[in-house]
Amino acid sequence: MDTRILRILDASANRAREALRVLEDCARFAKDDQALTGALKQLRHDLAMALARLPMELALQARDTPNDVGTTVKTESEFHRPALRDVLTANAKRLSEALRSLEECAKTLDPAAAAQFEQLRYRGYALEQSLTASVLASGGEERFKLVRLCVLLTESLCGPKPWEVILEDILEAAPPGGYSPLCIQLREKQLPDGELLRRARIVAQKCRQARALFIVNDRADVALLAGADGVHVGQSDLPCAGVRRILGSNAIVGVSTENLAQARQAVADGATYVAVGPMFPTTTKIKPRLAGPAYAAEAVREIPRPLVAIGGISPENVTELTAVGIRTVAVSAAVLRAPNAGDAVQAILRMLNQTHHDTH
């Protein structure tokens, strides 16, 4: 048997096993993702089954580490990984390359095994995509975890004051010092593009001054040009991965969901946070079905992302949501149409913070 083939099989098998172990550790310990951890563990098991078709004992005997010319060939980048994302990327590529070597060499010994390695490689590509999306989501996730109240800013819902004045009242209502617990979402469906961008730039500047987050509804292009922190998308809008291609890996991307299947998909796609709703009847957006607090409770138990309850939320019903574990809510009319927007913001924040402290 060709010793050269055996040595390639031995080295490639080691590389594939090592890479899979690193990826599994990323999913298990860095992201606490049970589904991805299980899928990577299964891939390790299936790799072992495919290797069992080959003469791996002979490959081990053919190993010649002292005379391996590759052990001393190193590049500087091998010893530097700036972030977890780089660890993940390096090992995902290592896995695919090792599986390709196994596939090609197996063709000389067992074509059926070669076909198995090909399928393992394709599965590795899909798992790399899911795990990368999960890690990328963590860029804005830590900052978003500080948010307690999202206000959807729509001029047509504002009271008698100009929207700019109401925005200032909202931002000034946040507790002083540190990052603001507020996130402003600009939601204007009918504005011409030029006016929407002008308005987004105004909101972005005011939010930066107040140390609050700012996201744009639907429009990743406007968010990019305005310097927003991210985008919120619905089920029929741009996909999360597409938004990240426009805004970058650290952007905040929120996704609206009405059931657990949609929420799970949002997590798989790399959403920073998952909006759950509608919680209660609302006049601002007609929905034929109310997901209600029961869905919020399900999401709290299962979804490993910050959750934002939305839909008909007011100071009168916030406690129904905090009772099931919701820590962040999104409102529009409850603040924009209030006699004093700042007072409404403070009232909702007090209720959210009080409930959070009571549970710790």
Image (cartoon, rainbow, N blue to C red):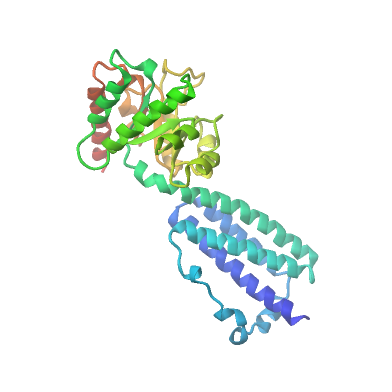
In the picture provided, is 79 more to the left or to the right than 112? left
- Front residue of 83/264: it is 83
Q: Quadrant of the N terminus?
A: bottom right
Q: Say if residue 342 shows up in the picture.
A: yes
**Residue 304 position within the rendered picture, expressed as x and y whole percent measured from the top left:** 44, 44
**Residue 319 position within the rendered picture, expressed as x and y whole percent measured from the top left:** 30, 28
How many tags in the picture? 0
Give the image quarter of residue 168: top left
Residue at 62% x, 56% y is: 124
**Residue 248 position within the rendered picture, expressed as x and y whole percent measured from the top left:** 48, 45
In the picture provided, is 77 more to the left or to the right than 332? right
Considering every residue shown, the one lying at the far top of the view is 160
In the picture provided, is 77 more to the left or to the right than 210? right
**Residue 349 position within the rendered picture, expressed as x and y whole percent measured from the top left:** 26, 31
Q: Is residue 304 above or below residue 170?
A: below
Considering every residue shown, the one lying at the far left of the view is 176
Give the image quarter of residue 50: bottom right
Residue at 37% x, 16% y is: 157
- Front residue of 163/298: it is 163
- Front residue of 113/122: it is 122
In the picture provided, is 184 more to the left or to the right than 113? left
Q: Quadrant of the C terminus?
A: top left
Q: Say if residue 184 shows up in the picture.
A: no
Q: Is residue 331 above or below residue 129?
A: above
Residue at 70% x, 68% y is: 102
Q: Is residue 317 above or below residue 8?
A: above
